[in-house]
Image (cartoon, coloured by chain):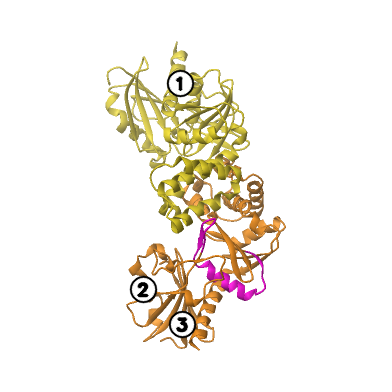
Chain colours: A yellow, B orange
Amino acid sequence: MMDGLDWIAVDWGTSNLRAWLMAADGTILDKRSSDRGMNALSRDGFEPALLDLVGDAIGNGPVTVIVCGMAGSRQGWAEAPYRSVPSAPPQLSAATRALVHDPRLDVRILPGLKQEQPADVMRGEETQLRGIFLANPGFDGTICLPGTHTKWVQVSAREVVSFRTFMTGELYALLSANSVLRHSIGEGWDGEAFSEAVSDAMSRPGSVAGHLFGLRAEGLLRGLDGARAASRLSGLLIGLELAGARPYWLGQPIILAGASDLSRAYESALSAQGAAVERLDSEAVTLAGLVAARADMKETAT
Amino acid sequence: MMDGLDWIAVDWGTSNLRAWLMAADGTILDKRSSDRGMNALSRDGFEPALLDLVGDAIGNGPVTVIVCGMAGSRQGWAEAPYRSVPSAPPQLSAATRALVHDPRLDVRILPGLKQEQPADVMRGEETQLRGIFLANPGFDGTICLPGTHTKWVQVSAREVVSFRTFMTGELYALLSANSVLRHSIGEGWDGEAFSEAVSDAMSRPGSVAGHLFGLRAEGLLRGLDGARAASRLSGLLIGLELAGARPYWLGQPIILAGASDLSRAYESALSAQGAAVERLDSEAVTLAGLVAARADMKETAT
């Protein structure tokens, strides 16, 4: 076994698999990742994918692997049934054990959260939320987790009260790569174009589908710059989201945790609305949530 | 040459090529189509694609071919520069001649229309509009052309005053085939789910990106029926569009011309808002516009 390896933390999403090889004292011995997310795997593929990534480190084992994310979905490795909100982020006692062929592995998959009305689900974000609560124990307000499916989460007393998911990131990816706008979208960032577009979409959300084609038309008629088009597209979609998520952020303290560029874009849009925003590193909070789940296990054992 | 063939009408769009083989008296001798739209062709590919489709019919020629649509774009066969609105639909004298290798072909490509503010463009729809004007010579009001890129057109005295394009159809195609919603969308139609979704989106357009993910969540939590999900997706996107296009349809007489299922959906959404709608067949109005362009040519010749 890798010197000092105590357990493995895993964030297994739709498109990516990330693992941290952890020592007992919390030191990160190694960090590894692959593109073998849930979408690339059948149920039988999860164990081999994990072994390909970390098998060399586990020696004769046994080793505990704590997993959050889509690996716990019905199409994943083993279903970890959702907990209903209002709820604290699930502890390890709620995890599902994955059936494994390799006796060196002890795999626990953390459940996600569900909400009946309006219907919504999260998997992985609940573990990020636990990490955020640890770093901000007294926080009451709104947590925004920007990403492919951005989550807005109302929290109080370290519980998730309600949440809402917006497909903003996936819409951006589809429109910039697969729609007629692909001809207009370029690299780079134009903060002014972004801010204008946020403001356009927030003041008239219904105009967004029209403004989208406007990017193409401006490209054809006036040679709209590719960075400007990309920033405007992002601004239109984030502005539409902010119009819909207003009850979550208006007058609330906000913590943002997502990829750094995307979080900065959200921060700039929210700050322009006078909202008070604190930004956290999303990878750090994910790992902190997994570390807390590992601590649950030790508490149970003692 | 095919018995009685006088000219060929062509609607050459992004994804499809449609040709009507026409007699001098307006009889349709044959109708043919292929999937060799602009996106499938390089500049050199247009002439062979046309000859593959109709070459057998033109004998020793020569034959006049009148084309509307994306074949006239910069990436098309030969650029037919846009006319600026306000403008009547362009006549044949504004068409661009395509360079051809086959001397039997005399190809004229009709220009589209552009608008500077807000930036917008159309190619092909201007010819549909001409067909609509012929069938409704006294019409003043709004024409809606539902499709991949739905056009809302304000017309007066057989001129296009202004127009606005919404990417609603392309958004539907991307979301239903390429997003996480593909797992939830099925076949069939649920009129009630459509109407509810239109109403949700119109009353709170900003909520649409949240409602979209809600379709996925309802699929996971409550087994949302595939037809219901598809109808709700369509309703959310059309509702968002109607919220943005309100200045076009509110208090205006409206003519709808598009594919029949889609036009019926728009009609149902608009009727629920108390709008007076007349539906026309989009293929018929396209051909009528091309026939009018052919008549321009004969008038010039005499």
Q: Which residue is mark 3?
A: B7
Near-viewer residue (A118 or A189): A189
**Circle 1 crowding by C-alpha within 10 Å: few under 14, some 14–19, many from 20:** many
Q: Is residue A135 found inside the magenta-colored segment of the image?
A: no
x 40%, y 80%: residue = B106
Label 1, label 3: how far apart the Cα atoms are:
75 Å
Is disc 1 in the same subunit as disc 2?
no
User: Considering only vertical position in the picture, is B87 above or below B7?
Assistant: above
Is disc 1 in the same subunit as disc 3?
no
* Residue B261 visible, this orientation: no
Label 2, label 3: how far apart the Cα atoms are:
16 Å
Percent of width and height locating residue A226: 41, 49
Identify residue type, mark 2: Glu
Percent of width and height locating residue B285: 57, 72
Residue at the extreme top of the image, as rendered: A302
Please say if the residues under marks 1 and 2 sit with CB atoms less than 8 Å apart. Answer: no
Left or right: B211, with B37 as reference point: right
Percent of width and height locating residue B194: 63, 52
Q: Is residue B123 found inside the magenta-colored segment of the image?
A: yes
User: Considering only vertical position in the picture, is A63 above or below B81?
Assistant: above
Left or right: A202, with B1 as reference point: right
Q: Nearer the viewer, mark 1 or mark 2?
A: 2
**Circle 3 crowding by C-alpha within 10 Å: few under 14, some 14–19, many from 20:** many
The magenta region covers B114-142
User: Considering only vertical position in the picture, is A198 above or below A302?
Assistant: below
Q: Which residue is mark 1?
A: A293
Q: Which residue is mark 2?
A: B47
Q: Secondary structure at mark 2?
A: helix
**Circle 2 crowding by C-alpha within 10 Å: few under 14, some 14–19, many from 20:** some
Q: Secondary structure at mark 1?
A: helix
Give the mark nearer the N terminus: 2 vs 3.
3
